[in-house]
Image (cartoon, rainbow, N blue to C red):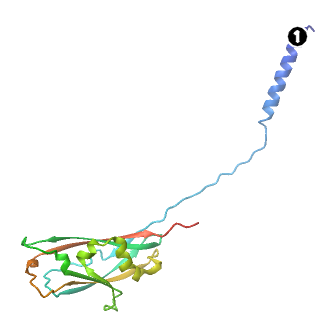
Amino acid sequence: MNIKKQLGMGIMSAALGIILIGGGTYAYFSDSETSSNTFAAGTLDLAMDPTEVIDIDNLKPGDSMIRDFELHNNGTLDMSKVTLETDYNVIDANGDNSEDFGEHIQVAFLYNMNNFDEVIYETTLAELKEMSPEAISKNIFYPELGDEGLPAGEYHDLVVKFQFVDNGADQNQFQGDGLELEWTFTGYQTDGEQK
């Protein structure tokens, strides 16, 4: 064989060897497993029964009303705390109010239906409106709910006494007036934990 053929065969043999060696590096055993994972978020579902705590008319100074309602945790997560935000709108029938009607409505939060005289916290609607929801929670709900908050699937019965305070002075400016009260209850989750 001539030198050109021998050199050509040598180059071809070397190229084939390189291809076989390179191809061999990809020939190996393998096995695989697929992991199926799920993340499902829990729910917070605070419900109130009844949703309307009070609806009364023909009030006069000195009248009082006791109403009870339940706060339910219908979710799957415990609530560490419940807060209350108060807002109201006074309907001045005669346009002659020099005072806020909410300052004359006393609100007392009581322990339970069997113990009406045991007051948790007492204030006026006007003062309650100015309080932060966290301050209300500490004064009203913490004594009732305690460290447990409101666990999932449970409820707490709350009792409120409203009184149109008779201050012994002329309160004629409130004749025919109305007050629309809005309470917003908010439940908060407990701290995150290692699962």
The residue that appears at 47% across and 78% down in the rendered structure is: 148
Quarter of the image with the N terminus is top right
Q: Where is residue 177 in the image (x, y as percent from the top left)?
A: 12, 75
User: Quick one: quadrant of the C terminus?
Assistant: bottom right
Q: Name the residue under label 1.
A: 5
Residue 40: % across, % down? 52, 61
Q: Residue at x 42, y 73 (%)?
A: 81
Element carrying mark 1: helix
Q: Quadrant of residue 8?
A: top right
Residue beneath the point at 49% across and 62% down: 41
Closer-to-camera residue (106/73): 106
Q: Position of residue 28 (x, y in %)?
A: 79, 40
Residue count near mark 1 (Cα–Cα under 10 Å), binned few <14, some 14–19, many ≥20: few
Amino acid on which the number 1 mark rests in the picture: Lys
Q: Nearer the viewer, residue 86 or 77?
A: 86
Q: Quadrant of residue 66?
A: bottom left
